[in-house]
Image (tube, helix red, strand yellow):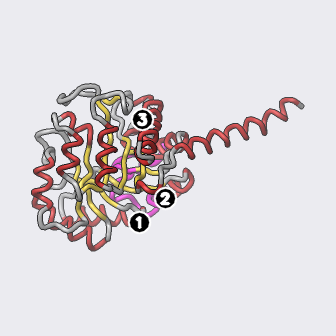
Amino acid sequence: MKRLLLIPFLFLSILVAAQSASNDMLLPDSLGWRLGSQAYTFRLFSLEEALGKMKSIGIKYVELFPGQKITKQGTATTAPNATPEDRALIKKLLKDNGIKAVCYGVVNGKNEEEWKAVFEFAKDIGIEHITTEPPFNQLELLDKFCNEYKIRAALHNHPVPTTYWHPAIVLDQLKNRSNMIGVCGDIGHWVRSALDPVASIKELKGRLIAFHVKDLHVYGSKSAHDVPWGTGVSNIAGVLNELKAQGFKGYFSVEYEYQWENNLPAVQESTQYFMRVAKRINAGN
């Protein structure tokens, strides 16, 4: 009899813990911010497994990346040329886990046909923006597809000397482009490039759509590795304060690229830090 009574008690405990994790991830509506995870954080696992990890710590949003296996047993991936059946499975997994796919990247196309496949995939899944690093001569084509599909594109930076490593380069390429193309600032890659992330954000004011958030253990080194947010040199609190001052409304992806086999505890610690800082900022503290 005692064992039978224990079963509903354990079930209730699991429900309470899950609800608590979900509530912990609720940002103040007035900020207009959403916090999710880049699926690449869990690149060693299938999308199915990655979504389960995210759900377990209350994450409600995800940035898909091309090439992740959809299920552990299968071979199909989240590539732009995924079949209608594979896309249906992706959408089912998202729905089952209560997670919305906000963005997709980093993804590029070699030609117009490949770009069309990217946008068709994004439209089917319900993606709001793609994260990309196209060559300069493709920006006009990208702008055309963004306006045609009503899906935004966010230019992403990798460390120096890659295409969009410096904000000044990005701004120069955004001249005469529609507001359907903006920026996904990778905070960790700015730090690796010896750029101050707060100064970079100030420079890109008005063009920011989203962020890949990383806190690193040292400044100005390409070999710098991720640490839980708030414990490194990326000045995450300063970044969030500047974005609040700018009136930024947009999306943040946890992209934790260290301790790949077991980084969920660090991801959870990072999201909890983000929520604490965001709530203090919103309260004017």
Dot 1 crowding, Cα within 10 Å, few <14, some 14–19, many 20+: few
Q: Amino acid at mark 1?
A: Asp
Location of the N terminus by quadrant is top right
Mark 3–mark 1 Cα distance, whole angstroms, equals: 31 Å
Q: Which dot, 3 or 1, sits closer to the camera?
A: 3
Q: Residue furthest front?
A: 284
Identify the residue position indicated by label 2 in the image.
91
| Of pointers 3 and 1, the one earlier in the residue sequence | 1
Span highlighted in magenta in the image: 63-91
x and y percentages locating residue 182 in the rendered image? 23, 59
Indicate the secondary structure of the residue bearing disc 3.
helix
Q: CA distance from mark 2 to mark 1?
A: 9 Å
Disc 2 to disc 1: CB gap under 8 Å: yes
Residue type at the position of mark 2: Lys
**Which quadrant would residue 120 be assigned to in this image?**
bottom left
Q: Earlier in the sequence, mark 2 or mark 1?
A: 2
Q: Which residue is the site of mark 1?
A: 124
Instruction: Please tell me which residue is depicted at 36% across the width and 62% down the height of the picture.
Output: 128
From the viewer's perspective, tell me whether residue 144 is left or right of residue 227. left
* Residue beneath the point at 49% across and 56% down: 89
Q: Is residue 69 visible?
A: no
**Which quadrant would the C terminus be assigned to in this image?**
top left
Q: Nearer the viewer, residue 75 or 173?
A: 173
Q: Residues within 10 Å of mark 3 (few under 14, many from 20)?
A: many
Q: Which residue is mark 3?
A: 270
Q: Is residue 237 left or right of residue 87?
A: left
Foreground residue among 23 and 284: 284
With respect to residue 7, does 278 lie above or below?
below
Q: Quadrant of residue 125?
A: bottom left
How many residues crowd mark 2 within 10 Å: few (<14), some (14–19), many (20+)?
Answer: some
